[in-house]
């Protein structure tokens, strides 16, 4: 099921702002957080389409990238990807950068529970996923213009 999102640009702004506080260096410029740097790299290659989905078939997902304790970017097959912003912070997700899920259907859906894992495979807590916002790779000409 697809829905048109009117807040795609607002989501990108909220994501950029919500990655935590930054510290100023000696020149007075703010140092970017790890999440802000990761989002910048994604924005170099992808852009939001404005479409959201409740579920994404697992066969369309290739891998995932943790942005912060509330945001996961799922790389898809071909030119598509999906940003998932959970409704609540998932403690230790950004630090551990590992999670697992179990699903009885061949889709990953909103409210599906993920469990944060540490490097030894121990479970740290569980969180529910949010909507999947569809992103697409930018055309090659747009990447070179920036």
Image (tube, rainbow, N blue to C red):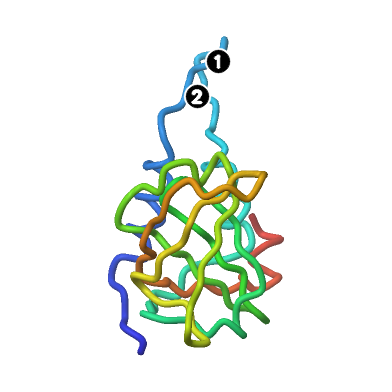
Q: How many marks?
A: 2
Above or below: residue 13 compared with residue 133: above
Above or below: residue 92 compared with residue 43: above
* Label located before the other in sequence (1 or 2): 1
Which is nearer the eye, 88 or 76? 88
Graded by Cα atoms within 10 Å as few (under 14), some (14 to 19) or many (20 or more), the crowding at tag 1 reads few
Q: At 60% across and 76% down in the image, what residue appears?
A: 61
Gap between marks 1 and 2, in whole Å? 6 Å
Above or below: residue 63 compared with residue 94: below
Graded by Cα atoms within 10 Å as few (under 14), some (14 to 19) or many (20 or more), the crowding at tag 2 reads few
Q: Secondary structure at mark 2?
A: loop
Q: Is residue 108 left or right of residue 7?
A: right
Q: Dividing the image into 4 quarters, which one contains the C terminus?
A: bottom right
Which is nearer the eye, 57 or 76? 57
Q: What is the x, y in percent for residue 51? A: 39, 79
Residue at the disc numbered 2 = 30
Q: What is the x, y in percent for residue 69? A: 44, 46
In the image as oriented, which residue stretches furthest toward the top?
A: 26
Which is nearer the eye, 77 or 59? 59
Q: At 55% across and 15% down in the image, what residue appears?
A: 25
| Tag 1–tag 2 contact (CB < 8 Å) | yes
- Residue 114's tag is none
Q: At 36% across and 62% down in the image, what residue appears?
A: 128
Q: At 55% across and 62% down in the image, what residue appears?
A: 100
Above or below: residue 131 compared with residue 3: above
Q: What is the x, y in percent for residue 112? A: 39, 71
Which is nearer the eye, 125 or 9? 125
Residue at the disc numbered 1 = 25
Q: Is residue 36 left or right of residue 111?
A: right
Q: Secondary structure at mark 1?
A: loop
């Amino acid at each position: 099921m697809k829905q048109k999102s009117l807040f795609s640009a607002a989501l990108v702004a909220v994501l950029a702002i919500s990655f935590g506080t930054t510290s100023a260096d000696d020149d007075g410029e703010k140092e970017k957080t790890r999440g802000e740097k990761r989002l910048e790299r994604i924005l170099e290659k992808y852009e939001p389409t404005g479409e959201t989905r409740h579920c994404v078939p697992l066969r369309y997902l290739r891998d995932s990238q943790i942005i912060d304790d509330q945001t996961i970017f799922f790389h898809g097959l071909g030119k598509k990807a999906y940003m998932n912003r959970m409704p609540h912070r998932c403690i230790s997700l950004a630090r551990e950068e590992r999670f697992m899920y179990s699903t009885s259907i061949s889709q990953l859906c909103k409210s599906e529970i993920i469990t944060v894992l540490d490097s030894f495979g121990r479970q740290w807590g569980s969180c529910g996923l949010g909507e999947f916002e569809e992103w697409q790779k930018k055309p090659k000409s747009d990447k070179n213009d920036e």
